[in-house]
Image (spheres, rainbow, N blue to C red):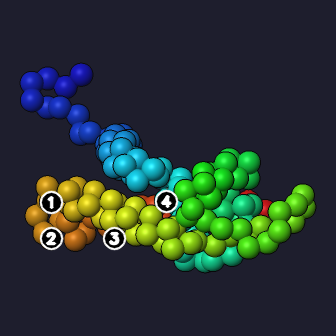
Amino acid sequence: MPAGNDLPTPSPAILIMMLGRQLRTEIERDLATSGLTLRHLSALGHLGREPGLSYSELARRAGVTAQSMQATLQQLETLGAVERRTPPGRGRTAELHLTDTGRRLRTAGLETVAAADRQLLAALPDQDATAVGPLLMQLLDAHRPEPRS
């Protein structure tokens, strides 16, 4: 163990996980005021960028099971945020789209995330705040899992 003031350098991985957990908790709390979760916002985001995705496609993108994504989308349908434009039935691929309500909820959710970004980056000098996104993207790109064959 280091003596005196020679403290070990904190682990970047641990610090990122701690910060991520804290941000997730804060964003989930703020999204809840609109009846949303991060999983809801993720689905709304994917459908906003690429209308017509199916349950399975959304589940793959979110890294969850199709059953879990179906439950998420049923909640969004109950909120009036998502509509299915194909007839229901076993074996049929759902074509899912945002409604006007879904677009409003997506916009509100994205503003919640933007507010968290502003609060997070306000603690840094402008030059450092500008560098955070690209540096984190570089780390994320370097640690993406290999595609499965």
The earlier-in-sequence mark between 3 and 1 is 1
Place of residue 50 in the rendered image (x, y in percent of width and height, measured from the top left): 61, 77
- Count residues near mark 4 (Cα–Cα under 10 Å), then give few for <14, some for 14-19, many for 20+: many
Q: CA distance from mark 2 to mark 3?
A: 12 Å
The earlier-in-sequence mark between 2 and 1 is 1
The earlier-in-sequence mark between 4 and 2 is 4
Asked where in the image residue 44 lies, by quadrant, the reply is bottom right
**24 is higher (above) or lower (below) than 76:** above
Query: What residue would you read off at disc 1?
Result: 122
Q: Under tag 1, what secondary structure?
A: loop
Left or right: residue 148 versus residue 103 is right
Q: Are marks 3 and 1 in contact (CB under 8 Å)?
A: no
Q: Nearer the viewer, residue 11 or 110?
A: 110
Query: What residue would you read off at disc 3?
Result: 134
Residue appearing at x 24%, y 22% in the figure: 1
Query: Is residue 9 among what the camera can see?
Result: yes
Q: Under tag 2, what secondary structure?
A: helix
Query: What residue would you read off at disc 4?
Result: 41
Amino acid at dot 3: Pro
Query: What residue would you read off at disc 2?
Result: 127
Amino acid at dot 1: Ala
Residue appearing at x 87%, y 66% in the figure: 92
Q: Are marks 1 and 4 in contact (CB under 8 Å)?
A: no
**126 is higher (above) or lower (below) than 33:** below
